[in-house]
Image (spheres, rainbow, N blue to C red):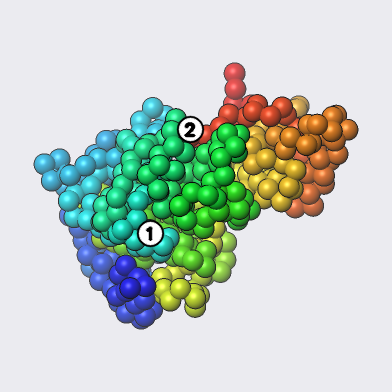
Amino acid sequence: MKFWNEKFETMPRAEMVKYQNWKLAETVRWVYEKVPFYRNALDAKGLKPEDIKSVEDIKHLPFTVKTDLRDNYPFGLCAVPMKDLARVHASSGTTGKPITGPYTKEDESQWGECMARALWAASVRPDDVVQISYGMGLFTGGLGFLIGAQTLGCCIVPSGSGMTERQLLLMQDFKVDALFCTPTYALTIVERAEQLGIDMKSFPLRAGCFGAEPWTVEMREDIERRMGIKAYEAYGLTEMMGPGVGFSCEHYNIHINEDHIYPEIINPDTLEPLPYGEKGELVFTAIQRRAMPLLRYRTRDITSLREVECGCGRKLVVMDKILGRSDDMVIISGVNVFPSQIESQILEIGSLEPQYLLRVSKKGYLDRLAVEVEAKPDVYAGGAESMARVAKKLESRIHNVIGITVPVTIVPSGTIARSEGKAKRVIDERKLG
């Protein structure tokens, strides 16, 4: 069996659109009847559920943004009473209020289906042993992978994050076939293995499925080379279901589970829809969820969508790797800079480690960007001249990519905090004090 769900993963485009039309119209009726927020939002635009007949009409629907979830915390956007909920997840909130993600039993089943597709595409099979090194709590990552592995029927090692040496012990002794964690924690694990003189290529481990943060092609290649595995991606967000919204196949194309989550790309400035192939902000509408289906949720992720003839055989729309988030972007001397652009250049220089920080500060009226990065041991062994040479090389590469000069400092090994979850890459010193 090549696919987990061949019907939907290989559904011809015309059939998929017909299915999406049905599910979108059903969802709009559901939220109009059950969620006062959406009833008011549609009424304000002069819309009734019967006006939305197909995905062509989705452009008329109102957007949903993160502040709407915070303003309606905890369950103001929930379409069912608490007695009908099977679980609630949440993401951390910068304002003190988290973003809640409630699920009915039906929603849980859908989540398991979408995650099973992701894991199957990542070569995970029912007789595999899988290690989940995400935090196992309110964050959707750990339990999203758990429900997917349970749906597949795998043997699960729910190790959680942290205690990195123990992660290695379990991986080796339990003969783990696949590892699930954030890509930055995967780097932390393999770095610790190298420090201990452990060659992870000798492990039975053959695959990793990583998500919860943007990561570059260069980081993926670094993980694959050092671990001796094939690295796959699981994309998602709490507001939709968690991981399982999208997943990569053996050709590294990220397929969207578009029978569950309808994707759009919009111009983040004009809010107008953009055609496939053009880069913009990713917008999702949940077309099967029951507890809290969101309409046209603005993810702030910058990417593009494409229809491709993928070698894996899947016909699901493909999403390019996330360039960054519109709210993570920093503007330096009028230039839009994403952390992923800097990361790509760091990882292409073999003498640098994938451990870095971007510091944004202000000098007078101008914003300034500086990079701190760790180097390989031989760079430090060469002394100040060696470190200066590598720093200069990175400065030159960054300048060639973004067109401005960014000072680079090679910092002592171990200076930058290692991640057990999502890595913090940008320190905005303009906001301090």
As drawn, the label of residue 124 is 1
In what quadrant of the picture does the N terminus appear?
bottom left
51 and 2: which is toward the camera? 2
Q: Position of residue 101 (x, y in %)?
A: 29, 43
- Left or right of residue 58: residue 50: left
Q: Position of residue 125 (x, y in %)?
A: 34, 61
Q: How many marks?
A: 2
Task: Name the residue at 26% across, 67% down.
Answer: 23
- Left or right of residue 412: residue 204: left
423 and 407: which is toward the camera? 423
Res 54 visible: no
153 and 408: which is toward the camera? 153
In what quadrant of the picture does the C terminus appear?
top right
Q: Position of residue 134 (x, y in %)?
A: 40, 40
Task: Name the residue at 49% across, 74% down.
Answer: 310
Q: Amino acid at mark 1?
A: Val
283 and 355: which is toward the camera? 355
Task: Name the residue at 53% across, 46% down.
Answer: 200
Which numbered disc, 1 or 2, marks the residue that appears first in the sequence? 1
Label 1 element class:
loop
- Which residue in the protein does label 2 denote? 165
The reply to whether callout 1 and callout 2 are in contact (CB within 8 Å) is: no
